[in-house]
Amino acid sequence: MEHTTKDPSQIKGWGVDADPKNDPTYPMKHRNDGEHSGYSWERPQQQPLTVEVLHSNERPDVTSVFGTSTPPSGPSGALRRLAFRYSESSYGHWLPLVLADRVSVVEGVLGDLKHGHVPNVFAEWGWKAEWKHNRTSLVRRILVRAVLVSAAVAYLSSRRTD
Amino acid sequence: MLAMHYRGPQRVRVDHKPMPQILHPQDAIVRVTRSCICGSDLHLYNGSVPDTRVGMTFGHEFTGVVEQLGEGVRKLKVGDHVLVLFNIACGTCVFCRQGLYGNCHESNPQATAVGGIFGYSHTAGGYDGGQAEYVRVPYADVSPTLIPEGMDPDDAVLLTDVVPTGFQAAEMGGIQPGDTVVVFGAGPVGIMAARCAWLFGAGRVIVIDCVDYRLEFARSYAPCEAYDFRSLEDPVVFIKRTSDSLGADVCIDAVGAEAAGSAVADDPRQKTADAGRVCHRAALGDQFREKGRDRLHRRGVRSYRCPRPDRERGEQGHHHSGEPGIGKAAAATTDRARAERRPRSESLDHPPRPPGGRLGCLPDLFGEARRLHQAGADAAVGHIT
């Protein structure tokens, strides 16, 4: 419980940003009520739509600039298009997106194989580094998964023989 | 070019990608010189951010050299070495004009809750990020900042996210000279918040966490008092006792988004937020699931000073930030409420600005961080090998 900092003013930079006149520092919005006049700003030039870009149904159109990484495609793309029919306040938006993310993992593996590339999933999981720096946890995880998978296999095969 | 590829939860690889192109007159192509992995990249890595598509490149903290410019870019020239802030902002929309760059309305078509962020899923605009050889940087006149002469890129890259996040925590806390500041969580953001608390004239800075090496780093870097909450019988009682039974003036929550957002934590937060100044800045990391960290957050909100009957009217309101976020998309919410200052802090004069101003202390801040980090890294490597 010792108060160890006897004289904080000796710390380099102490108080350089102190400004008692600026309290509270929050809110830091420089309010100009621009929202009251809607889309009144001069919008930047529109980036050409060279790929499919989904946009939130809470806004009228795509933004002037957008990312073009990994446009929607395949079954996961269909799920994403469905998701964007619902607003950001709805599970109908977020849950299909999470599902689409999982579907696109499978599509990613299939895409790799189609291009003649067998993904080295152990390297992608970083098992070499885990083995070196985090061995106990890695071994524990592998064992837990092995037990779960064998239990599932045993359960399913016992049902089949019944 | 080579770039990091996301292949699925906890699966990434380095692979070839087409070179980024100028797609808009205000674009720049930047050759990356430094790039970081942020704690909030772990959310993407673990597959917990919706619309993180396979094939994305992460990375929102990077510096680089301008290789190519769109015809509309005025402030940069080819060859400039810039640090690129993680937000993508147009600088002209209604939010940017009010300083709310994190909620730019012209950079993220996929969501309205947040503006565009480099390499942070399609929920943040679908931009490929900086963990690559080259990056397309939109609105190059707004966010990229020239690295001042003499500043090492290793230091400059810290200014793209982690330093401002911690600094903003201290700034939003409204620290006044002489205040006692408690920072919960000694991750990178918490440590930076503790360091920056001094810049606002804090009288005392206390960091609480449960990871020894982080506490040790905070103790020598911030420099501050740092305590393991497991060794304290009751952290709330401890903080009250060590601050004349009144509680801290400012508490900064840098524990993590998951712990900060728990339903259990919400209730006491509502009850106690009007008793002090509250600033939540979430540092993200693998510790957030660690047992006790959500409790740590709850204790955080109970450690403020008690409200006093003589506080001014109009200062009691609990302001929940419904305004667009200024800072990080996934991490930050700010609850702020005020109580009046402790009498002893009012007796302190506003300290004079040292020569060189606020930027004058940056080299020290970075130099010390690197020295300590290297020492820690050497020790860790020695331990492993």
Image (cartoon, coloured by chain):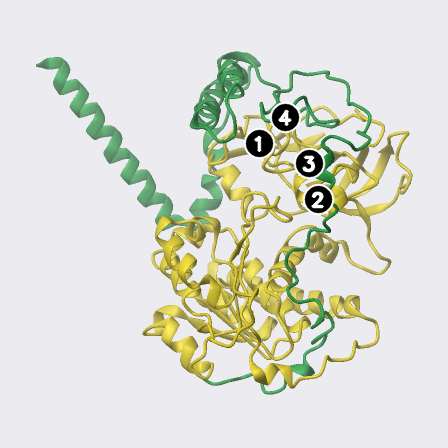
Chain colours: A green, B yellow
Bin the neighbour count of mark 2 within 10 Å (Cα to Cα): few under 14, some 14-19, many 20 and up.
many
Labels 4 and 2 positioned on one and the same chain? no
- Secondary structure category for the residue under label 1: helix
Expressed as whole percent of the image width and height from the top left, the position of residue A16 reads 74, 72
The extreme front residue here reads B313
Position above or below: A161 against B304: above
Instruction: Identify the amino acid type marked 1.
Output: Thr
| Alpha-carbon span between mark 2 and mark 3 | 24 Å
Are the numbered discs 3 and 4 placed on the same chain, yes or no?
no
Q: Which mark is residue B123?
A: 1
Residue drawn where x is 72% and y is 29% of the image: B1
Residue placed under numbered mark 2 in the picture? B101
Whole-percent x, y for residue B160 in the image? 70, 50
Looking at this view, is B350 or B332 the one in front?
B350
Give the number of the mark in front: 4 or 1.
4
- Mark 4, residue position: A59
Query: Type of residue at label 2?
Result: Tyr
Residue receiving disc 3: B132
Mark toward the start of the polypeptide (1 vs 2): 2
State which chain disc 2 sits on.
B
Report whether B97 appears left or right of B304: right
Q: Is residue B46 above or below residue B354?
A: above
C-alpha distance separating marks 1 and 3: 20 Å
Name the element at disc 2: helix
- Which numbered tag is attached to residue A85? none
Q: Mark 1 or mark 3, which has the lower sequence index?
A: 1
Q: Residues within 10 Å of mark 1 (few under 14, many from 20)?
A: many
Does label 3 lie on the same chain as label 2? yes
Q: Earlier in the sequence, mark 2 or mark 3?
A: 2
Q: Amino acid at mark 3?
A: Ala
